[in-house]
Image (tube, grey):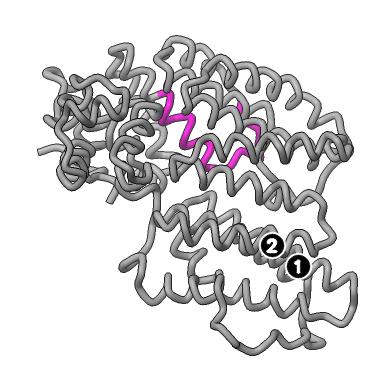
Amino acid sequence: MANEDLGRTLRRLRHLASLTQVELAERSHVSVDMVRQLEEGRKYSARLPTLHALANGLGVELTTLLGDPPAVFTGETDGPRFVAVRRAVMPVLWGPEPEPPGSDFSLDRLRERIAEGWTRYHAAEFDTVMKALPDLLADARTATASDDEDDRGAGFAALGKALQLAGHVAVRMGKTDLALTSLERAIDAAGRSSDPLLPPMIVNSTAWTYQRQGRLEDALSIALRAADDMVNAGRDETADGLKVWGALIMSAATSAARSGDYERAAEMMETAEKEAARVSKLPDGGDNRMVSVFSPSSVRIERVRLAVQYGHPEDALALAKGMRLSKDTPPSWRTWLLLDVARAHTDIGDAAGAVKTLESLRRVAPTWMQHHTLAVAIVRDLWALPDRPPGLRPLAEFLEVGE
């Protein structure tokens, strides 16, 4: 669960690895004082580069150290519903080939259902998405068996997008190996589709999954290669194409930052922000629900995040001040922004500002907040203060944190 104690998890994983605090600090290139503060509960959170370093030192994925990533589901992650998703992603060996679609089959309806799945994913309705995925994947495979060549290509595009969605859900459930299997199959389907933007979109999802596994160099290299390939093919000259390219550049910047190369990350983010201004000037794209998130708002949200992670809370608050989010900014991105602003307020000692921001988050995205490790960590840090700010107790109760 998201509200499990980071220090307790760190101590348990360190003991399993037969490491002393000093040995873990040396392996991770993190101060032994940081390890002690986390394990003793004097500190409830740390910046992402530090967490990545500790996870690498322990030889585990970042999600193992943090506990469960933001997720909402009923039952165990290996219960019947998730088994059904696994089976849909990886059909049984020697199973029957899909039958061609019948006369009542509608590709448009299938695409709408997949787009709705992405909307629900960004709203943190993961359990609802898991229920829908087996049928979505089965229907998409049916579409790939069409006798019509154009419909067959569109069917592979639908299958690629549905498998990409399954990969994202798997990451949220902490199943990154299943996510990579799903994404590899998604890339294969995308390559047989009629959508040239789909393969680089799925590469971006793969880079994100690599990040969750601590494979930062791999994430950086594939994101940059896919972005370069798009430019060389001239696919960044439409609104949708530029969004896909921009999302890849932001992903690469995040990997660079988490690897400790903050200057390179900042340069890439500056380039992305300049290019994002072109999106509205290019020929209009298709369904925003089916394309990578990239806009001036999303770039600014990422810049705020990097500033917080690298110890520049004042810069983060200045970047966030007066931000106007575009109407297509998903709830998940709004959540990240408010969490980072709350973290920045905490870092400068403005507990009241942090509480006010978390109250806003609870109003606009309660589901995301309730299951997000960073939200819990911030409230834990505030709860440990000798003078707790007004309004903190209801937040602590909401997140089941405190006494």
- Residue 324: x and y in percent read 61, 25
User: Magenta region's main secondary structure?
Assistant: helix
Q: Quadrant of the C terminus?
A: top left
- Residue 286: x and y in percent read 80, 49
Describe the element under mark 1 as helix, strand or loop.
helix
What is the magenta range? 324-341
Camera-side residue of 77 and 386: 77
Q: Is residue 305 visible?
A: no
- Residue 115: x and y in percent read 66, 59
Q: Residue at x 49, y 40 (%)?
A: 215
How far is disc 1 from disc 2 in space, using C-alphas? 6 Å
How many marks can you see?
A: 2
Q: Which residue is mark 2?
A: 160
Disc 1 and disc 2 in contact, CB within 8 angstroms: yes
Q: Which residue is mark 1?
A: 156
Q: Is residue 303 visible?
A: yes
Q: Inspect the image, locate mark 2, and give the three-letter code of the amino acid beneath it.
A: Gly
Q: Residue at x 51, y 36 (%)?
A: 216
Location of residue 89 with respect to 142 vertically, above or below: above
